Image (tube, rainbow, N blue to C red):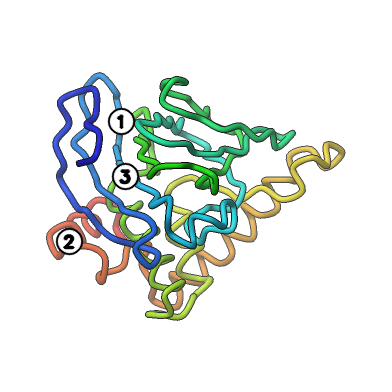
Amino acid sequence: MAPKSPLDEPVISGPFSLYEGSFILEFLQPHPSRNASVLLRATYKHDHTLCKKGSGHPQAPPLHLHFNQSETFEVLQGKVATVEGWSVTSRVCTREDGPHEIKPWVPHSFHPVPESPEDTILLVWAHPDDVDEMMDRVFFTNLLMYVSDVHEKKVSLNPFQIMLTQHVSATALVWFPTATWLGPLRWWVPWKVQVIFAVAGRLLGLTPMMKKYTSEEEFAEIQKAKNI
């Protein structure tokens, strides 16, 4: 049984077995004290061959930043590795470290630790919950399930789709983070490339959230709220 959240936060969606069973995803109802737009519990299966790849795990995101929200990690069991800041500093987080907040505009990524002797279980939440273009459960469900299906060759990668899905969460990739002489171009250029792909995707008839990964009720609500 997975370690419980320290707060009263029941599972509201999942578990979903992704990336050939190496990554288990669950969504919890965030406690009001978190001021979170989404709370997920992720499990890396330590004995799976994909988790032995560390940063090469297909779930591990490229270096990126969020404009509007912090992203906080708390390891409940095992170890997770993070890469943070413009200096791309690596660190390994464990249960003893407690919650670790990555603030807006801070480049970051994370991945399983190949040497972890047990499954790694962590909570991840985005906050605050009162901003525009926030990360939410539907966003993470679509992004993670889509990338998993691409990895498992169930669908083909559509760059217009993934850029559009990412774009609505106020997230940008970071290129050449240690090239300080580039200044804000390190995120501004990939952001503008993402804008072009997102606009083109809409013109092609794509929507940020895909019906395959979104319930009919939620899809209708998103269309109404965001005029997708």
Using the image, determine if residue 71 lies above or below residue 7. below
In the rendered image, which residue does mark 3 sit on?
A: 136
Using the image, determine if residue 30 lies above or below residue 221. above
**First of labels 2, 1 by sequence position:** 1
Q: Position of residue 153 (x, y in %)?
A: 43, 80
Secondary structure found at label 1: loop
In the rendered image, which residue does mark 1 sit on?
A: 36
**First of labels 3, 1 by sequence position:** 1
Q: Position of residue 165 (x, y in %)?
A: 42, 59
Q: Could you tell me the amino acid type at mark 2?
A: Ala
Secondary structure found at label 2: helix
Looking at the picture, tell me which residue is in the foreground, 122 or 225.
122
Q: Is residue 181 left or right of residue 222?
A: right
Tag of residue 220: 2
Per the model, the C-alpha gap separating discs 2 and 1 is: 23 Å
- When asked about the image quadrant of residue 76, the answer is top left
Label 2 Cα crowd, 10 Å radius (few <14 / some 14-19 / many 20+): some
Looking at the picture, tell me which residue is in the foreground, 183 or 93.
93
Q: Is residue 108 left or right of residue 44?
A: right
Per the model, the C-alpha gap separating discs 3 and 1 is: 9 Å
Is the C-beta separation of discs 2 and 1 under 8 Å?
no
